[in-house]
Image (tube, rainbow, N blue to C red):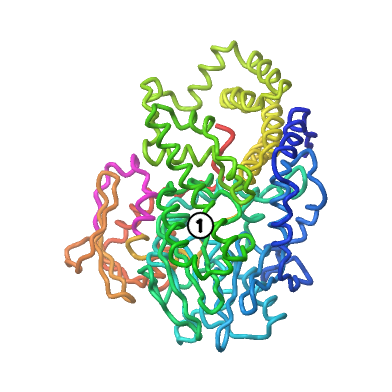
């Protein structure tokens, strides 16, 4: 694939940023090296088939000064995040960083070690624990803590412990209340769409290098091994709740509705160490992640940070999180947590102030300015979340998608809008002329807008797709935000090389296995093709023999409805099976053993015939 140099406009932007930000501040460079004990002898981590699921060495190019094709602030962040290995935070508390998107922390107790956040994949988690044991001895794992309900904080669990150990009471699994429900719902309900967009967000199909993927700001990218889940044995429900695990006292603080719907902080008095989960990292985080999610609440987020300062701030000497490097020293921690709190509080309050003055989300995003102290704090820069898309998320949270202008209440959909815009501008050739002029003038945002319309009129015009790819590439080169860069460059890649689909699938079998029956029925219901099912009226009953639960399901008006109730004996079909067999049945498996059928199986076949699964390769930059 041919890639371009940075244009003069982008080069000038990069140099201006070098003058504007405090690049002489070396504190993060020292912190990221602190306590380094060693790293993997072989940086490529493989699965059982020998396929590479993570290779830290692919980021070895991140040395020296930033090239013109990478925003220098993002280059600095990526160099810090790419540092990989085992680190001593304080004696007895260790972290493995740079072996996945997230960080694994390990806290030594009386007889073994408590693992916090076992990464995304079995393979990377196993490699991280092996690295720890290489330096600290073969200590058994006595507990696993999930800080919150995102896959990079539980997916690797079966790479370090197994269900039998948990069932035998050898290992506790601790999580905030509701984690499993939120985890499986996020990865199953909208999992197809989120997975496709996550491929853009994390640059999954991009070549790593100065003209491709350099990192996502929060971490470099996602591993591509096997994701798993073991249900918690202890759910934390109350702030102030205290438990002793392997001789370690742990004091918990609930923080739901912040970076994740189910999340918690916790404090280890023995080490004077506070885990802030993912609520105070070395970047502005997302209030609405670009892959898609429910909008997060920055007001509640800032309040929980205030509560953490008040509850633990008098004693804490080190803060560590689920991403990035720790912060040491009580005064430094107060400054760090206070500024993180102010960051989310400021964005919330100022967005509300301006929307109440009649400004729209896009207008607020352009107008808002952070206070100088936040603007110049490296940990408040927008490497993962951005001020721009976070402000729009806050607007969406309070006001919804409609900005109040009646002309925008019922616009044409993209393809029909594009046809009208291109016609109004004088046809494709005229749009190309205007877009080329905007490109040459360095107005890449306007060029992208014009070319977005043009490509929705004629996606086969190579002049359009070529200039569109070149435009997105320049926008990527200039982006300080890692996920924006990945989105722009991924769009350019698909315009030049074709649709790359969904490289990483989070809807893994081990996660689907944790679905409750109700969640499974919901997951089936959202795949019903409504128009094809309009004329169907179906009813059947299911008994889950391993759970001793029964349900009646009906399909009418294209809606699948379930009610838990004892079998009536009057339904035209009754199925008896286990929950695992139900999961296979929902995937279309009618033939395997374990399905006891009474009545007309044709009822079920009619339902399966109107299911329409998601498309993991739907178009994003093309119509």
Between 260 and 537, the one nearer to me in the picture = 260
Between 580 and 207, the one nearer to me in the picture = 207
Between 220 and 453, the one nearer to me in the picture = 220
Q: Is residue 474 above or below residue 62?
A: above
Residue interval drawn in magenta: 521-539
Residue 165 visible: no
| Numbered marks: total | 1
| Quarter placement of the N terminus | top right
Q: Residue at x 46, y 48 (%)?
A: 293
Residue 388 sits inside the magenta stretch: no
Q: Position of residue 209 (x, y in %)?
A: 77, 48
Q: Position of residue 127 (x, y in %)?
A: 67, 73
In the picture, measured across the screen, residue 453 lies left or right of residue 213, that is left
Q: Residue furthest right?
A: 64
Residue 267 visible: yes
* Mark 1 crowdedness (10 Å alpha carbons): few <14, some 14-19, many ≥20: many
In the picture, measured across the screen, residue 144 lies left or right of residue 439, that is left
Q: Which residue is mark 1?
A: 279
Q: Position of residue 623 (x, y in %)?
A: 55, 32
Q: Is residue 48 above or below residue 208?
A: below
Residue 528 sits inside the magenta stretch: yes
Q: Residue at x 39, y 20 (%)?
A: 407
């Amino acid at each position: 694939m041919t890639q371009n140099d940075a244009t003069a406009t982008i080069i000038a932007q990069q140099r201006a940023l070098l003058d504007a930000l405090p690049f002489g501040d070396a504190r993060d460079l020292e912190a990221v090296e602190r306590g380094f004990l060693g790293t993997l002898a072989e940086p490529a981590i493989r699965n059982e088939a020998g396929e590479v699921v993570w290779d830290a060495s692919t980021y070895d190019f991140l040395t020296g000064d930033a090239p013109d094709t990478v925003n220098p602030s993002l280059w600095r962040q990526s160099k810090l995040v790419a540092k990989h290995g085992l680190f001593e935070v304080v004696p007895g508390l260790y972290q493995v960083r740079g072996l996945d998107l997230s960080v694994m922390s390990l806290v030594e107790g009386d007889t073994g070690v408590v693992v916090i956040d076992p990464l995304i994949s079995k393979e990377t988690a196993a490699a991280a624990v092996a690295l720890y044991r290489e330096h600290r001895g073969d200590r058994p794992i006595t507990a696993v803590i999930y800080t919150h309900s995102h896959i990079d904080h539980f997916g690797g669990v079966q790479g370090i412990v197994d269900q039998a150990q948990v069932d035998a009471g050898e290992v506790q699994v601790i999580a905030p209340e509701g984690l499993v429900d939120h985890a499986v719902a996020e990865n199953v309900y909208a999992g197809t769409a989120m997975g496709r967009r996550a491929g853009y967000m994390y640059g999954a199909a991009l070549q790593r290098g100065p003209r491709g993927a350099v990192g996502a700001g929060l971490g470099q990218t996602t591993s591509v091994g096997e994701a798993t889940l073991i249900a918690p044995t202890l759910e934390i429900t109350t702030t102030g709740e205290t438990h002793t695990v392997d001789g370690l006292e742990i004091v918990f603080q609930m923080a739901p509705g912040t970076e994740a719907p189910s999340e918690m902080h916790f404090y280890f008095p023995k080490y004077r160490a506070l885990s802030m989960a993912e609520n105070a990292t070395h970047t502005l985080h997302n209030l609405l992640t670009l892959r898609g999610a429910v909008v997060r609440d920055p007001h509640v987020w800032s309040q929980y940070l205030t509560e953490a300062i008040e509850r633990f701030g008098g004693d804490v000497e080190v803060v560590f999180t689920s991403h990035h490097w720790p912060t040491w020293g009580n005064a430094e921690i107060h400054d760090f947590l206070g500024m993180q709190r102010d960051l989310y509080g400021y964005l919330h309050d100022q967005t509300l102030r301006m929307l109440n003055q009649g400004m729209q989300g896009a207008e607020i995003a352009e107008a808002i300015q952070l206070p100088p102290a936040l603007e110049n704090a490296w940990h408040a820069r927008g490497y993962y979340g951005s001020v721009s898309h976070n402000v729009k998320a806050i607007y969406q949270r309070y006001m919804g998608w409609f900005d109040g202008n009646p002309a925008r209440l019922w616009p044409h959909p993209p393809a029909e809008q594009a046809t009208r815009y291109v016609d109004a501008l004088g046809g494709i050739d005229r749009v190309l002329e205007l877009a080329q002029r905007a490109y040459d003038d360095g107005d890449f945002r306007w060029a992208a807008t014009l070319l977005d319309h043009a490509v929705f009129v004629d996606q086969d015009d190579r002049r359009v797709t070529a200039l569109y790819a070149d435009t997105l590439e320049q926008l990527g080169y200039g982006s300080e935000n890692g996920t924006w860069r990945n989105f722009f460059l991924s769009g350019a890649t698909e315009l030049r090389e074709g649709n790359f689909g969904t490289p990483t699938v989070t809807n893994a079998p081990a996660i689907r296995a944790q679905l409750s029956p109700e969640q499974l029925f919901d997951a089936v219901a959202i795949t019903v093709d409504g128009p094809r099912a309009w004329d169907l009226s179906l009813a059947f009953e299911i008994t889950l023999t391993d759970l001793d639960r029964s349900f009646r399901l009906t399909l009418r008006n294209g809606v699948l409805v379930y009610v838990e109730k004892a079998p009536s004996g009057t339904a035209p079909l009754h199925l008896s099976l286990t929950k695992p067999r139900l999961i296979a049945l929902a995937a279309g498996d009618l033939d395997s053993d374990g399905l006891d059928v009474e009545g007309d199986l044709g009822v079920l076949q009619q339902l399966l015939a109107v299911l329409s699964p998601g498309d993991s390769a739907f178009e994003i930059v093309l119509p």
